[in-house]
Amino acid sequence: MNSDIFKTLAEPVKGFFKDRGSRFNALAFPVDAEDEVKNIMAKIKKEYYDATHHCYAYRIGHEKEIWRVNDDGEPSGSAGRPIYGQIQSKELTDILIVVIRYFGGVKLGVSGLINAYRNAAADAIANGEIISKTVNVLFIINFEYTVMNHVMKIVKDENILQLEHQLDLHCKMKLSIRKRDADRILVMFRKIEGIKVEIC
């Protein structure tokens, strides 16, 4: 697989597992920053305030460098790790999976908990659509209207995604460009007279 491609979820999804009265509701979200994880967790803890545990795992970054697991009071390694194991097994990133447990009155033991959290997370992933995304670089380009045709030819020929544009006498565009193509396209833009390119 190309190093600038990664797999994640297309949209939030739910999963479920039940064992001896305990209910395990899994919620999976595509995320791209730890602040986003904090916001989602705050909302979940408020919405599911009556749950026994809110265990989770996440992984962020196309190089899968940011990750965390949390057992939220369950025996160490019995909740967050099994959830994270499902993220790893599907080679996903930019994903948060939260499993909300409602205790059913019967203790499941560590092996029972591992099985329950793993199955709840797996069910959520199975219910979702896994998509491939490219690692992109953001360009902000400033140019005079007189060279608009030259700029737009590159944008069109290279099928570049425009995130924002301000077209006036002085024009500004924010473009999302696949990482593997960024250097080559940067050279093309810099050949246009008077253009200024800022890489975010």
Image (tube, rainbow, N blue to C red):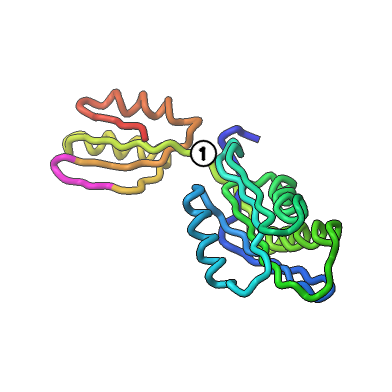
Which residue is situated farthest in the left direction here?
Answer: 169
Q: Secondary structure at mark 1?
A: loop
Q: Residues within 10 Å of mark 1 (few under 14, many from 20)?
A: some
The residues colored magenta run 165-170
Badge 1 is on which residue?
Answer: 135
Is residue 184 highlighted in magenta?
A: no
Residue plotted at (43% across, 36% down): 137
Q: Is residue 181 above or below residue 25?
A: above
Rendered-image quadrant of the N terminus:
top right
Rendered-image quadrant of the C terminus:
top left
Count of numbered badges drawn on the protein = 1
Residue plotted at (70% across, 53% down): 80
Q: Position of residue 116 (x, y in %)?
A: 79, 62
Determine the image quadrant of residue 169: top left
Residue plotted at (73% across, 59% down): 74
Q: Position of residue 10 (x, y in %)?
A: 57, 57
Q: Position of residue 195 (x, y in %)?
A: 24, 29
Residue plotted at (21% across, 25% down): 193
Q: Is residue 155 above or below residue 31?
A: above
Q: Nearer the viewer, residue 159 or 190?
A: 190
Q: Nearer the viewer, residue 161 or 133?
A: 133
Q: Position of residue 35 (x, y in %)?
A: 47, 51
Disc 1 residue type? Val
Q: Is residue 82 left or right of residue 143?
A: right
Determine the image quadrant of residue 124: bottom right
